Image (tube, grey):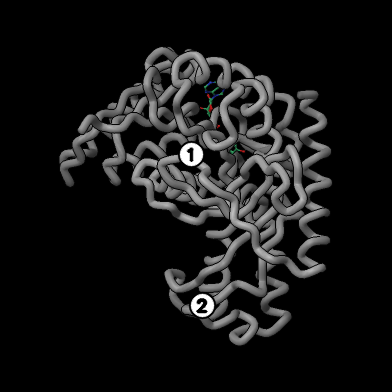
């Protein structure tokens, strides 16, 4: 069986960690694409990871280039090309610059990897994934935004920290847009099947929810320059692996809704089944009236940013 091929568009902070995780999981050969101005850095990262393989014997190849033709035939394309936030910036502040970049990237991906499953990461996520979808003309099953995997991992982390229990046993989901209006679902959050409402006080749960919504901003402040990169990369690879191994994982992801949750024509975070068919299905959770109102609120924010793309 031929090895799978993974193309990373953007070889910055997230791109570098993606290349390392994909190598360590032996998911396939990896091509990192970045702009010509940083070609030396990209080639260096690729060569550095090549030389990290012998210790554990990972048989995949990693190459770096600024030549898009190198992504030809990629099974998965992961897009982190763009600029990250600096302290004081919202994700929406990145729209103009990242919209230009995604347009260029979408045209190249359409040309060289027309059959790929595409995971978009650049912010503001819900609008940038929409832009990729519109410019590329790819089917909705093969275009998805990574946000829910990360936001859910953050929710799981804080529940585990607050209860002192294993993060492995925490199960929960975050829906909605990738920003402060996201909707962490409390009623269905459990630790080993025990509802968090039986384990934590309302004050503790409220504090967790607030922290989840601001978790990205907390890291932007701590780093001082740039945004989170280890945790986004882990979330992205979870999605890529689900596709490559046809795992039928259920991962909250920004998917194109056509009627689900009463949303029509927008990408927003919803529970998705990811397998060999890409986004095979969107699962509909029955929401309380309060949760519906929160989802409506986050949709209003997403719609506004999408409208600013002019697409
Ligand atoms: N084609 C390919 N790569 C590009 C392009 C382009 N047209 N324009 C910029 N890049 C590259 C940059 O040169 C840089 O190496 O994208 C990379 C982005 O890396 P970082 O600046 O380190 O950003 P990172 O932390 O990886 O985040 C990337 O993901 O979470 C979001 O908000 C974040 O939009 C940002 C993206």
Residue 16 point in image, percent of width and height: 41, 36
Residue 183 point in image, percent of width and height: 71, 60
Whether pointer 1 and pointer 2 mark residues with C-beta atoms closer than 8 Å, the reply is no
Asked where in the image residue 20 lies, by quadrant, the reply is: top left
In this rendering, the label closer to the viewer, 1 or 2: 2
Residue 69 point in image, percent of width and height: 41, 12
Of the numbered discs 1 and 2, the one sitting upstream in the chain is: 1
Asked where in the image residue 198 lies, by quadrant, the reply is: bottom right
Q: Which residue is mark 1?
A: 14
Give the residue at the far bottom of this rendering.
198
Identified at 75% across, 42% down, the residue is 264
Label 1 CB-ligand 1 distance < 8 A: yes
10 Å crowding of disc 2: few (<14), some (14-19), many (20+): many
Q: Which residue is mark 2?
A: 191
Alpha-carbon distance for marks 1 and 2?
29 Å
Residue 37 point in image, percent of width and height: 49, 15
Q: Please, is residue 267 above or below residue 167 in the view?
A: above
Q: Is residue 163 left or right of residue 267?
A: left
Q: Could you say whether the residue bearing mark 2 is in a helix, strand or loop? A: strand
Q: Quadrant of the N terminus?
A: top left
């Amino acid at each position: 069986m031929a090895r799978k091929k993974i193309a990373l568009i953007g070889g910055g902070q997230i791109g570098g960690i993606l290349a390392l995780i994909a190598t360590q999981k032996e998911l396939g050969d990896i091509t990192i694409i970045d702009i010509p101005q940083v070609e030396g850095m990209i080639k260096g990262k690729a060569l550095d990871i090549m030389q990290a393989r012998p210790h554990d014997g990972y048989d995949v190849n990693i190459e770096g280039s600024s030549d898009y033709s190198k992504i030809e035939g990629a099974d998965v394309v992961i897009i982190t090309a763009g600029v990250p936030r600096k302290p004081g910036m919202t994700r929406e502040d990145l729209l103009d610059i990242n919209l230009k970049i995604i347009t260029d990237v979408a045209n190249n991906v359409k040309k060289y990897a027309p059959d790929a499953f595409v995971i978009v990461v650049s912010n503001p996520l819900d609008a940038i994934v929409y832009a990729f979808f519109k410019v590329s003309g790819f089917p909705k099953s093969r275009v998805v935004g990574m946000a829910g995997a990360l936001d859910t991992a953050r929710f799981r982390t804080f529940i585990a920290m607050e209860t002192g229990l294993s993060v492995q046993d925490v199960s929960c989901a975050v829906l909605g847009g990738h920003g402060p209006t996201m909707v962490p679902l409390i009623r269905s959050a459990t630790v080993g099947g025990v509802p968090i409402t039986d384990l934590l006080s309302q004050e503790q749960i409220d504090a967790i929810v607030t922290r989840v919504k601001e978790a990205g901003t907390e890291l932007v402040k701590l780093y001082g320059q740039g945004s989170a990169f280890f945790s986004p990369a882990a979330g992205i690879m979870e999605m890529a692996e689900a596709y490559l191994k046809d795992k039928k994982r259920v991962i909250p992801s920004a998917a194109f809704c056509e009627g689900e949750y009463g949303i029509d024509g927008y990408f927003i975070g919803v529970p998705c089944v990811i397998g060999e068919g890409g986004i095979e299905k969107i699962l509909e959770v029955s929401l309380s009236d309060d949760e519906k109102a929160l989802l409506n609120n986050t949709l209003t924010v997403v719609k506004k940013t999408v409208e600013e793309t002019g697409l």
